[in-house]
Image (spheres, helix red, strand yellow):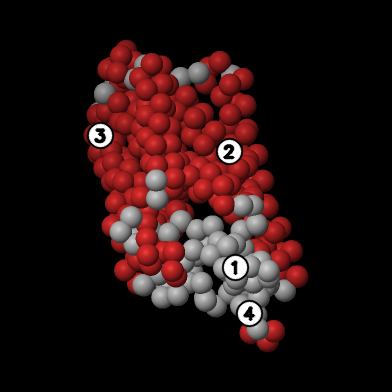
Amino acid sequence: MDLKNSTHTRIDHGPVLCFESSNSSCERFVYPSEIQVLLYLFFSAIALTTVCGNLLVIVAIIHFKQLHTPTNYLTLSLAVADLLIGGFVMPPSMMRSVETCWYLGDAFCKIHSSVDIMLCITSLLHISFISIDRYYAVCHPLQYRNKITPPVSLIMISLSWGLAAFVGFAMVFLQLNIMGAEEFYFDNVACEGACIIFQTAAASTISSFLAFGLPAIIAVSIYLKILLVARRQSKSIQHSAHVGKKNSVSTNKSEGKATKTLAIIMGVFFVSISPFFFCNLVDPFLDYTVPPA
């Protein structure tokens, strides 16, 4: 499929180019001005909500000392990643989606794409580590304080950011995403005004599994285990009438509620990003017929 000559044209006036003076320019689709305004308002609202929501989480955790726990350190780091998505990744992506062209240069395109991949992966890794934290809090409450300490939480955070940065920047700057398909990419995809993360079938399969499939499997498996243990604990609590266990019962209920809330939030997160990874996975096998974002 020739992605250079895609349907991003205005049929009644012939092809419209991102750069009229360039022979290697991409074609673009021109939205009516009313649609452009609505799209900008819609995407801006999403970006602003993302920034403000995560900023509130960051300020709350930093300000209130009682929230300085290993779990919330992970939540704080996750909020920073999501804040950067809303503040750094979304605005240029919004411009690219509405204008259907990239006008910010090749160098910034590579940086933007690398940071986009990095932040997406680090968010998913944080979710996996938070599920591990919840597993110990609910399933092994007596060992929790010894197993999940602030230094351990810091290691989890460092791994999330370090691995994600390595994958994101290595994939884009070393062109691992087009390895084995360089000729096809430069002949049919690359053009001036484009900024897309093209991937071969092998690259999309590996990246989708490592960035989405594996963290999702880990998180879902752990939360299923937590659910089973929580149900057993609930039955045990109902049959226990010992006064000395009131504090333990209260703690278990509190941990259970926190875990349930996090599980719902993370479930919504996985569901919301699954369409992207599904398209990312199947696109190479469908001759790249999925429209670029």
Name the residue type under label 1: Ser
* Residue type highlighted by circle 4: Pro
* Secondary structure type for disc 1: loop
**Please, is residue 27 above or below residue 279 in the view?**
below
Whichever of callouts 3 and 4 sits on the residue coming sooner in the sequence is: 4
Q: Residue at x 37, y 60 (%)?
A: 182
Rendered location of residue 155, percent (x, y): 37, 22
Q: Is residue 114 above or below residue 234?
A: below
- In this rendering, position of residue 290 left or right of residue 202: right
Closest to the camera, between mark 4 and mark 1, is 1
Label 2 to label 4: alpha-carbon separation:
38 Å
Compare marks 2 and 4 and give the one earlier in the sequence: 4
The answer to whether the residue labelled 4 contacts the one labelled 1, judged by CB atoms less than 8 Å apart, is: no
Counting residues from the N terminus, which is met first, the one under dot 2 or under dot 1? 1
Mark whose residue sits in front, 2 or 1: 1
Question: What residue is disc 3 on?
Answer: 229
How far apart are labels 4 and 1 at the CA level? 11 Å
Which residue is tagged 1?
Answer: 25
- Whole-percent x, y for residue 163 in the image: 37, 35
Residue at label 2? 83
Q: Earlier in the sequence, mark 3 or mark 2?
A: 2
Which residue is the site of mark 4? 15
- The Cα atoms of the two marked residues, 3 and 4, are separated by 61 Å
Q: Amino acid at mark 3?
A: Val
- Kindly indicate whether the residue at mark 4 contacts the one at mark 3 (C-beta within 8 angstroms): no
Element on which disc 2 rests? helix
Residue situated in front as seen by the camera: 189 or 11:
189
The label shown at residue 177 is: none
Find the distance from the CA under tag 3 to the CA under tag 2.
34 Å
Residue 37 x/y as whole percent: 74, 64
